[in-house]
Image (cartoon, grey):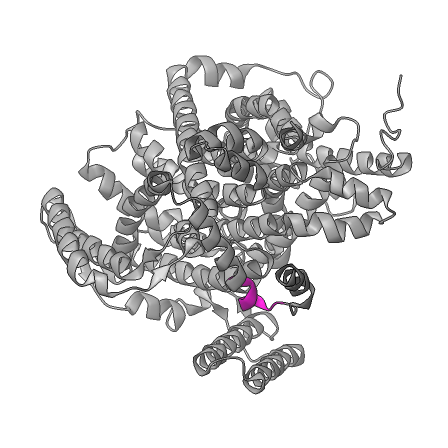
Amino acid sequence: MASSDSSLELEPREPVPSGSAFRARATRRAAQTADAWRSDGAARWLFIWPAVLLILVLSIFPLVASVALSLGRLAFHQGGVDLKIIGFANYQQLLFGLERSHFLGVLKAPNPIGWAVVLATLALCAVAWTRAARGGRVRPIGLLLRLVGGLLLVGSVWVLVQALASDGGRPGALIVTLIFVFAGIVLQYALGLGLAMLLVQQVPWRRFFRIVFLIPLTITPVGVGYMFLMMTDTSKGPLEPIWVALGLRDFTWVTDPWLARLAVIIGDTWQWTPFVFIVLLAALESLDQEVREAALVDGAGRWQSFRHITLPAILPVTTTIILIRLIEGFKIIDMPNILLGGGPGTATQSLTLQAYIDWNTLNLGRSAAIAYLLLILVSVVATVYVSFVRRRVTDLA
Amino acid sequence: MRNPFGRRSATDLSPPAKLGAFVVLLVWAFVVLFPIYWLVVTSFKTPYVVDKGPFYIPFVDFQPTLDAWRYILVELGNDTLRPYLNTVIVGLSSSLIALVMGAAAAYALVRFTYRARVGIIGLGIGAGGLAVVAALLGAPPAIALLSALAVFAILAQTIGRRFQRAMGNSDIAFWLISQRILPPIAVAIPLYVLFQQIGLLDNILALVITYVAANLPIVVWLMRDYFASLPRELEESASVDGASIYRIVRSIVLPISVPGLVATFLIVLIFAWNEFLIALVLTSANAQTMPLQVAAQNATRGPQWWAMSVLILIMITPVVAMAVALERFITRGILVGALKG
């Protein structure tokens, strides 16, 4: 009797779990599961090894070869190619040397708004860090890591502000790519979720919409690029009457950096919203509708039922979608390349496009160096994202 | 006739809300379909008509012609058919293989716990790196690989056992997805060298292998969330009843995962169908795929819009047809039915 009492009381008395407690509990649960399934020893390995082996074989060689390329310069001569190792010169050129204005941007002293942003970030980081230090729950090594992370954050904000909120500053490929990625993810997720939510309702023409909404994803990215080139042509494109009606007959958006970037973001969103849409649709459709309906019958509002039932159920898959779009988005190339050739100037040149241009001019070393910097940047962003966001909302991490 | 906007059940949307939803959906459908419509009309235009400015409606605004279609389907004939068949074969086979391997790995990552030992992994990477360096320095690849394997086996048995730090399931999953970060630009040349060594250049097998590897992480991540959201009760009760894991997967897990599997299959099929840069580098004539044909229409005389439109349209037709055929599987009821039945 006593034991059943205590087990009854344990649950409500448990404090609100912090991230690490969640993780500990998840591990414990997973360990119990492992015991239950231990009899399937062969399946354990059979299920996962083919995937791991294939990826291992196909990934290690390009990874190692790219490092070698990025540290060297290819010399072409009659009958062959020589790789001359020149150390970190390619990286140095991109981050500090000649190519910095191209890669990072033209950095100038920030204007007052820029200063305000930097100081606010600095203050926030300082407050968060002192809190962690005073709380006493974080180990010294954790504090050190947090300090480094905070300094990195302030440093990146400093660079961003110098390029974007300053007189005469200009963002380079790295910052332009960040803009594309984050604007794209926000737009695509909002649109994809909205459309998926509408289409789980019993609206007329449901099947028609579900298939039509998938179409942009089915077109090859190169084709989408050319299609948008047609659509955005202000003299022969189908939108020409609209431009004329707005009195913009001789106006070209191609020469304005921000309009050009906007065009790329619109094209990217047109193409990738279906991806978010179809994954969320599958997730929403597999939810147990009875719980939601019961809540609605019991008088919960639609917003409440979304907030407390639907949203928690789709949070794990949401974080996966965002992670995949983050990784894929950083590789954006076709839309800015075909639409604008990276122009005006280098205003829409993404990292991959810059690497591609170097690749085409046979500067393979610098191309590989750009790719590696991209790899490092995305790895850091993705790791931070997985450990700070995804671990909070799912046991899977 | 029933009012299409009427309530179907007590919890359904109210008629005005439903009408509003319908209008929003119509607007987005227009945004999606208008560029497609433009592709269709462009495919029936002559270069002169395209150049003269926007014309919208065939027979009213301009006289349609089948020139572009005839050019792509008849004049080019086999030069269109071969890449088309390649795309179909590569797309279907690579996405099916990726789906099977990836779903298995995803299920394993949800239901089993793994402890991948860091020491062993480090040794493996080191040995692999040695093999690559040896190969770059001119050793025959087969010998370099074999000696690296031998070094790895010896060291793993001796030093490797001392390092007990391990990676969990989430670390394995993150490692898998991190393989997609390096842009195709950086991967293309090493892959070219790799497939050159094993004599698979300009062979669709090379594309199949590459696309399976490239799409596996996507399958693993999407299906992992999906499997994790399935109720455990069914599998546990089957396990208690003595069913083997293969039986449980085949007759319980797979049937109730159909919506997720179908959505994932469509996504990776589309990725493989449309991939451009790797195909550009790994193929020359025999194994070329359709995205290369589309890009090739941007000739020295400027983009051949009419021909490009035809190619894009014949490229998306089978994928859209497949989406039409598979769409009904992405629907509710399957899971609920399984739980009740």
Q: Which of B262 and A84 is in front in this view?
A: B262
Q: How many marks?
A: 0
Relative side of A378 to B199, left or right: right
* Residue A264 inside the magenta-drawn segment: no
Mostly what secondary structure, the magenta segment?
helix
- Magenta region: A17-23
* Residue A20 inside the magenta-drawn segment: yes
Relative side of A160 to A310, left or right: left
| Residue drawn at point x = 51 percent, y = 53 percent | A396
Q: Nearer the viewer, residue A24 or B75?
A: A24
Quadrant (top left, top right, bottom left, bottom right) of the N terminus of chain A = bottom right
Q: Determine whether A233 is above or below A380 in the image.
A: above
Task: Please state the horizontal and vertical placement of residue B166, each as a whole percent of the image.
Answer: 34, 61
Relative side of A177 to A301, left or right: left
| Residue drawn at point x = 60 percent, y = 80 percent | A128
Q: Which of B91 and A132 is in front in this view?
A: A132
| Residue drawn at point x = 31 percent, y = 65 percent | A90
Q: Determine whether B127 is above or below B12 in the image.
A: below
Residue A175 visible within the image = no
Q: In which quarter of the image is residue A231?
A: top right
Task: Please state the horizontal and vertical placement of residue A141, each as a whole percent of the image.
Answer: 43, 80
Residue B83 visible within the image = yes
Task: Please state the horizontal and vertical placement of residue A317, each as a whole percent of the image.
Answer: 59, 48
Task: Please state the horizontal and vertical placement of residue B112, each as a whole percent of the image.
Answer: 43, 47
Q: Determine whether A67 is above or below A96 in the image.
A: above
